[in-house]
Image (tube, rainbow, N blue to C red):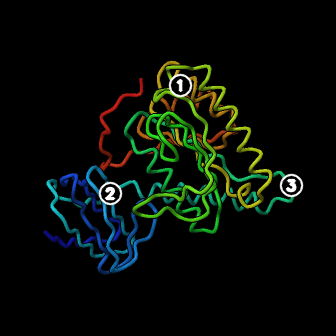
Amino acid sequence: MKNVYRLEADEELRIEVDCPKTEKISVELMTGVAEIFGTEMVQHTKYYFAAGAKISVFTYHGCTVEVSGNLEVEPYSSKETPMIIYLNTHAALEQLRLKAEQDTDSTARGPITLLVGPTDVGKSTVCRILLNYAVRMGRRPIYVDLDVGQGSISVPGSFGALLVERHAGIEEGFSQNSPLVYHYGHKTPGHNLVLFNQLVSKIADVVRDRLAANKKAQISGVVINTCGWVKGEGYNQIKHIAQAFEVDVIVVLDQERIYNDLVRDMPKFVKVVWQPKSGGVVSHQRTDL
């Protein structure tokens, strides 16, 4: 089955791949310019996705997209999308990179950005968008994934850090060339708080050394993804992560309470911003504790 969707400027096509596990669906850009999570689509190229994938095709100028396959859930388009907000966030981070680039101090570095929020608000997706936009500007940021429940860099139960030298492939994600990975052994931080905090401090030290050794990475900065545990000891861990990595910017998705708490508890030089989650976010149906 083939369906063609015409999107207007600043509109998003949301696709939940609910086909049989043995099948895949394809998405093809027919006309115009569009992107998937910050990676530009190539016209007349089919991108294939298996069951369980959640995709958003966004266009700043308008486009036509063809979706082929046996989808049980009909894709839908929406103009209610936070993509413009994410673009503005990228622009603000890029200004900080330009400032660091022009600074005569050899230790000047780009922004260290921390993404926080409860489970299933799209933190990993926003990280991917910000990293892709940075790479498209010629930057080489470091991506740190502290979400031990999902593990986008390595297997669940581990931490990972990766120098991002090219944008994520639409189908396969970021290149997994020589990632730094630490084994934690649990899929939730609450199983061993002491070990979790020790590993966070260790990976922060290694990332700091990597920045000092690579001028381009130092200017580009770091984007850090976290798990969805934000209450009680989970909130204390967020503060520990922020201190260990010496973060400059904290982006809070969806939860205004966490935003207000962080504004109160973080040093004045740390910029804390609140942003809405996308209406296309779908629950993973898992818990963090």
Q: Residues within 10 Å of mark 3 (few under 14, many from 20)?
A: few
Give how far across and how far down residue 154 sits, in percent: 51, 44
Identity, as a three-letter code, of the amino acid under mark 3: Asp
The residue shown at (16%, 70%) is 3
Q: Is residue 235 above or below residue 98?
A: above
Viewer-side residue, 82 vs 225: 225
Which residue bears the numbered disc 1?
235
- Dot 2: element: strand
Query: x, y (%) of residue 264?
Result: 59, 27
Kind of residue at disc 2: Ile
Residue bearing the label numbered 3 = 105
As drawn, the label of residue 55 is 2
Q: Is residue 228 above or below residue 104?
A: above
Classify mark 3: helix, strand or loop. loop
- Residue 14: image location, x then y, percent: 27, 58
Disc 1, SS: helix
Q: Residues within 10 Å of mark 2 (few under 14, many from 20)?
A: many
x and y, in percent, of residue 169 in the image = 46, 64
Q: Which image quadrant for residue 13?
A: bottom left
Image quadrant in which you'd find residue 24:
bottom left
For the point 83% across and 51% down, the residue is 107
